[in-house]
Amino acid sequence: MENRLVIGIASSALFDLAASDQVFRDQGEEEYRRYQEENLEIPLDPGVAFPFIRRLLSLNDLSSEGDPLVEVIILSRNDPDTGLRVMKSVEHHGLPITRAIFMQGKSPYKFMPVLHMSLFLSANPTDVNEAMARNLPAGQVLPSNYTEDDGDSDLRIAFDFDGVLADDASERVMQAEGLDSFHAHETANAVTPHSPGPLHDFLKQVNKIQRREEAKRASDPTYRIRLHVSIVTARNAPSHQRAVASLKAWGVTVNDAFFLGGIDKGAVIGVLKPHIFFDDQQGHLISTSQVAPSVHVPFGIVNSQPLPEA
């Protein structure tokens, strides 16, 4: 497992559980259990993170025999009985997911380190906050109006920089002293790499798959690259230089970088059309979640206050 990109995903992120959650909230656990049993053979509809997971798993066609590049594990608060509908839905949709952890009423994120997970995705903000509080990389998948385009097999992943790929040291300067001081600080430290942030390892693992794609294309010129990675950040010149230097120092790469200087990210994300976008600031995600699956990474100073329950 340590040589694979391993992602843990809650059923709330993978499937649309709106109807199930409403039963649980309105009628309690026993009715919820009865509801899931009665609907056992009715597959759950895809959720917000479904396109990302499906496309990511499709890259296992680059794997060596018996050693997949990508492993996705269901992490669920359901007990095994009520979780059976989730696994039947996985099978119905043809997802090659065979591993799951079901813990009645408890989030299994504590098992992330032993399973070598680079990311945990859930629609439950409490579970995500608790994971992040223990320095485990996690993100809350937000509701979205996104409709998947099935016209290609590409996978586009987009990241914010500060508080996502990098730590929030520079963001602290921004929050305390303002934009001019931020630019001055970044210019003075232009060749000093940032410390890695919560999703640094996830990008590193994604880069391994990209290198496998490059090797495939080298041996087969007809092969078309499918995995694309972008940074979409509010940074602009002169602060862009330190971000680029940090990526190089970490030994990670991206295909594209958008240094927007305060331009609304939603407009750019709407054209870029990533299958998932990670940002640490909820204000940015209001617009992006309307046009793309968006994930809030509750890290650093901008998330110093607890998130409200969904």
Image (tube, rainbow, N blue to C red):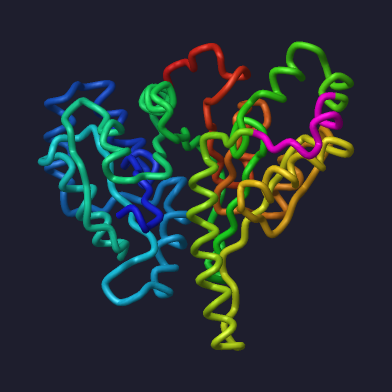
| Picture quarter with the N terminus | bottom left
- Residue 77 picture location, percent across and down: 23, 32
Q: Residue at x 78, y 39 (%)?
A: 191
Bounds of the magenta span?
185-194
Foreground residue among 188 and 62? 188
Quarter where residue 242 is shown: top right
Foreground residue among 89 and 219? 219
Q: Is residue 127 above or below residue 233?
A: above
Q: Residue at x 51, y 56 (%)?
A: 206
Quarter where residue 101 is shown: top left
Q: Residue at x 16, y 49 (%)?
A: 40
Dominant secondary structure, magenta = loop
Q: Is residue 185 left or right of residue 274?
A: right
| Picture quarter with the C terminus | top left
- Residue 9 picture location, percent across and down: 35, 43
- Residue 199 picture location, percent across and down: 52, 40
